[in-house]
Image (spheres, helix red, strand yellow):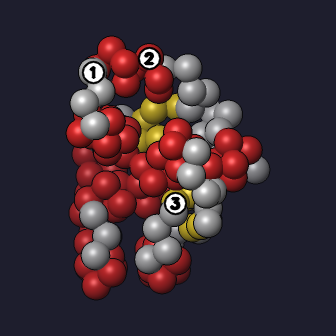
Amino acid sequence: MKPPVLDASALLALLLGEAGGDTVEAVLDGAVVGVVNLAEVVSHYAKLGGSRDDIEAMLRPLPIHITPADAALAYEAGLLRPVTLERGLSLGDRFCLALSKREGTRALTADRRWSEISAAAGVEVELIR
């Protein structure tokens, strides 16, 4: 089975020791995180006063693959807007879903709203809690 794509909420559950973090830990090796979702995680810690050096030191050892955003991914994420609008999913959510679709693997998230749009988005979603 291909490694999953992690939403920021899934990665944060692991880092913060929240419910579902054990599910993320079990699939962490080789998991994919898009740069947009990485920015969301960095934003969380920056809001708490974390420095760049401290945040990088925490994230660098994780055995994850960071995937850059490109034009094709931006189009795919943008085209998901009509599907996700009613459920209030963010741009970061759409980038994660688009990356999961492109990678042909499931997306892990703590956001229950994703299961309501997974079929329409053409993505397998696994809720971590």
Badge 1 element: loop
Badge 3 element: strand
Q: Residue at x 31, y 55 (%)?
A: 92
- Tell me whether circle 3 and circle 2 mark residues in contact (CB < 8 Å): no
Tell me the distance, in whole angstroms, between the alpha carbons under discs 3 and 2: 24 Å
Q: In the displayed structure, does residue 47 sit left or right of residue 14?
A: left
Residue 47 position (above or below residue 77): above
Tell which circle, 1 or 2, labels the residue nearer the N-terminal end.
1
Tag on residue 51? 1
Tag on residue 116? none
- Tell me whether circle 1 and circle 3 mark residues in contact (CB < 8 Å): no
Disc 3 crowd rating (10 Å Cα; few below 14, some 14-19, many 20+) is many
Residue ranking furthest to the front: 48
Which image quadrant is residue 124 in?
Answer: bottom right
Disc 2 crowd rating (10 Å Cα; few below 14, some 14-19, many 20+) is few
Q: Which residue is mark 3?
A: 109
Tell which circle, 1 or 3, labels the residue nearer the N-terminal end.
1
**Pair 1/3: label in front:** 1
Q: In the displayed structure, does residue 101 sit left or right of residue 49?
A: right
Query: How many numbered discs sit on the rendered protein?
Result: 3
Tell me the amino acid under the disc marked 3.
Thr
Tell me the distance, in whole angstroms, between the alpha carbons under discs 1 and 3: 26 Å
Tell me the amino acid under the disc marked 2.
Ala
Residue closest to the eye, 21 or 27: 21
Q: Can I make out residue 99 in this image?
A: no
Tell which circle, 3 or 2, labels the residue nearer the N-terminal end.
2
Tell me the amino acid under the disc marked 1.
Ser
Q: Which residue is mark 2?
A: 57
